[in-house]
Image (cartoon, helix red, strand yellow):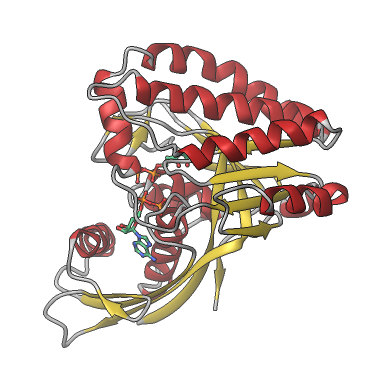
Amino acid sequence: MRATAKAHTNIALIKYWGKRNEELILPTNSSLSVTLDGFYTRTTVHFKNELQKDVFTLNDKVIKDIAYERVTNYLELFRNYANKQGLYAEVNSINKVPTAAGFASSASGFAALAAATAQALKLDLSEQELSKFTRQGSGSACRSIYGGFVEWQKGQANDGSDSYAIQIAPQDHWDIRVAAVVLTAKEKDVSSRVGMKRTVDTSVFYDGWLDSLPADLEAIKEGIVAKDFEKVGSIAEANCLKMHATTLGAVPPFTYWQDTTMTVMQTVQSLRKSGFPAYFTIDAGPNVKVLYLPKDEQEVLKKLRQTDGVTDVIVSKVGEGISYV
Ligand code: ADP
Ligand code: DP6
């Protein structure tokens, strides 16, 4: 009872930022992402009768802290579904992505874990069912089941039965690039889970964020279908700024940005002024992702690498969905 799966991270162009149900991980808003080929997780799940509890190894280190609790609680969902209570697993995972630093390791991590677990237990799940399971590990992970451009439909049902991801356009629909601009690979102070809860509970700006989302989502989907880069980039950048603005209205207020985050934002704006369309987006961390077109790669990467505080720039193309090794 063993299987290995690989999943890529994704970067949200319309952000998921808030839950209506924390236990089932049901979002307050629909979101949309592009899957990235540059960052991924490979996870092997091996169920063994002789184990007394789950064992979780991440990047060759045995994990015993809260990350272990998250994994073992998550496996419990599958055990209950498959009627295999008391059957424990060795989970070995390798992140080809910095962990807990705003590069969405939780997205590739839980997508790979869900796929490997379902396969090891020989559950014959559709991609939609797998996306619903993955959502319960980490919300944004449910989008990593698919390659290309992916929407997580928030759904209405209280049991989460209609909250899952769907593919808007496949991997080969549109060749855009995403540069991950690394400022720091340190673990962040406020996790996305804690940050979004504080924002939903306390931010005076949260209602404004929610009100603006349906229009952003519809417009960006039109832009993706039409391959209108300026439209997609400008909506993504504005949506990211709105999400980050909500954290400043929280109690106590917080921000994921550093001074160098803003320096990279200025580089992107100056690229645009010189005629190179490039747009930024930022998740729950200081690092910046920059969207651009392949024809502009040389100039965009040169300017990003010259920016103060930038330690690395890692390029992704549009990535594929789950695969089994
Ligand atoms: P990130 O920006 O990296 O997604 P988060 O704080 O949202 O940061 O999530 C990081 C957490 O995701 C880790 O602390 C761990 O609990 C979990 N995680 C990361 N990688 C894996 C993995 N490969 N397998 C299982 N869980 C993982
Ligand atoms: C800013 O999916 O990590 O990256 O569901 O609590 O695990 P949990 O949160 P998570 O949050 C991602 C937030 C975001 C935006 C996004 O990816 O849509």
| Res. 90 in view | no
**Residue nearest the viewer, comparing 230 with 4:** 230
Q: Is residue 180 above or below residue 246?
A: below
Q: Nearer the viewer, residue 168 or 256?
A: 256
Q: Where 89 sits versus 302, above or below?
A: below
Where is residue 304? Give x, y as percent: 68, 49
* 256 on left or right of 50: right
Where is 172 relative to 61, above or below? Answer: above
Q: Ligand 2 appears in which quadrant? A: top left
Q: Residue at x 53, y 26 (%)?
A: 241
Please determine whether, in this image, residue 205 is positioned above or below residue 167. Answer: above
Q: Residue at x 18, y 64 (%)?
A: 65
Residue 51 spot, x, y in % from top left: 16, 83
Choose top left, top right, bottom left or bottom right for residue 298: bottom right
Q: Position of residue 133 (x, y in %)?
A: 38, 52
Q: Is residue 243 left or right of residue 234?
A: left
